[in-house]
Amino acid sequence: MSNLQLKATSAGIPQLAADSVSTGYLRVGSRLPLVIEPAFIGVDLIDWATKNREFLEENLLQVGAILFRNFDLSSTEGFEQLIETASGKLLNYSYQSTPRTLVSGHIYTSTEYPAHQSIPLHNEHSYSGSWPMKLWFFSMQVAEQQGETPIADSRKIYQHVPAEIRNCFERKGLMYVRNYGTGLDLDWEDVFQTKSRREVEDYCRAEAIEFEWIGDDQLRTRQRCQVSMKHPRTREMVWFNQAHIFHISRLSTEVRESLLSTFAEEDLPRNVYFADGTAIEPEMVEEILKVYEQHAVIFPWHAGDVLLIDNMLTAHGRNPFQGKRKVVVGMSQKHVPPSPLC
């Protein structure tokens, strides 16, 4: 690690923030993530972040992710205070696509999928018309084996998705279809954080989501969304969607065949199509997943680590794990694009 003394340059040297921290990178040749550590015992991360918000913002826009390591942060309350200090008011996790539990305040568990499952790299809420710009992760308990949170530069993903696939996706756009109340995925009450149908309908209208009530308990939604976006600050293009997660081909063969033996394809808990309703070829999805895998940056969590990412510049995921693991999450700075997405 090197003392934090110089301004950022094209070579990637960090900008002056304070003599109380040092910076570096996890491996030679990779700037993702920037690592910030205390230069001596007793440096308070919340106090340091309060005084260095501009430094954090400027370097986050360059690198895309910042890892705070070896600071004395141990509670969710302190984590929440850090987020509010550095990036403002926390957001509720509404219109969710995965199960989470509220821990305290506006801090949630990371996605509660079974430990043996991996979660592909993705950008939070990129299946919707608005999303948090900042994601914060706090490693409170490290798994005995694996359990890493891989990250990847969304700018590089955009650049390396094969041009014919990228052009096709951008030309056609995407449509996410979700069915709630089937007993196989999240209920609409959990996703929309309400038991009121009227509130669900109001939310859907505000977010340009088509909705249809089916019987007493089921809800079907369709939403046309972006494939890629221009970052509002850096003006760089990023790959920004979750087609590779929602697509039916991502289910195991056994699960897919079982579901299709019971449900029509339009009734599946979730799926994604091109915006005109035509099918996306599984081979395209496979190529996109390969690009994510090629650009994944994987590093082991340390207890007490805090990871800050720009949600448009950096994708994240989760590796399978053994043993107990506790990573909590906070989100801030809701972004609503000023123009139509597709």
Image: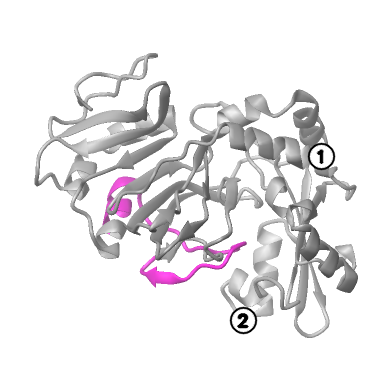
Report whether 155 appears left or right of 166: left
Kindly identify which residue carries mark 2: 195
Question: CA–CA distance between discs 1 and 2?
Answer: 39 Å
Q: Is residue 334 above or below residue 15?
A: below
Is 231 magenta? The answer is: no
Q: Nearer the viewer, residue 130 or 292?
A: 292
Where residue 5 sits, quadrant-wise, is: top left
Report whether 280 appears left or right of 29: right
Q: Amino acid at mark 2?
A: Lys
Residue at the extreme bottom: 216
**Helix, strand or loop for disc 1:** helix
Q: Is residue 227 above or below residue 193?
A: above
Picture coordinates of residue 59, whole percent (x, y)? 36, 30
**Helix, strand or loop for disc 2:** loop
Q: Dot 1: few (<14), some (14–19), or many (≥20) neighbours within 10 Å?
A: few
Picture coordinates of residue 290, whole percent (x, y)? 67, 35
**Figure quadrant of the C terminus:** top right
Q: Is residue 177 visible?
A: no
Please state the extent of the stretch shown in magenta in the rendering: 81-106
Q: Which mark is residue 283?
A: 1
Say which residue appears at 49% left-offset and 31% top-offset: 233
Q: Dot 2: few (<14), some (14–19), or many (≥20) neighbours within 10 Å?
A: few
Q: Is residue 44 visible?
A: yes
Say which residue appears at 78% left-offset and 36% top-offset: 169
Report if the CB atoms under discs 1 and 2 are less than 8 Å apart: no
Report whether 125 appears left or right of 46: right
Report whether 65 appears left or right of 84: right
Q: Nearer the viewer, residue 132 or 251?
A: 251
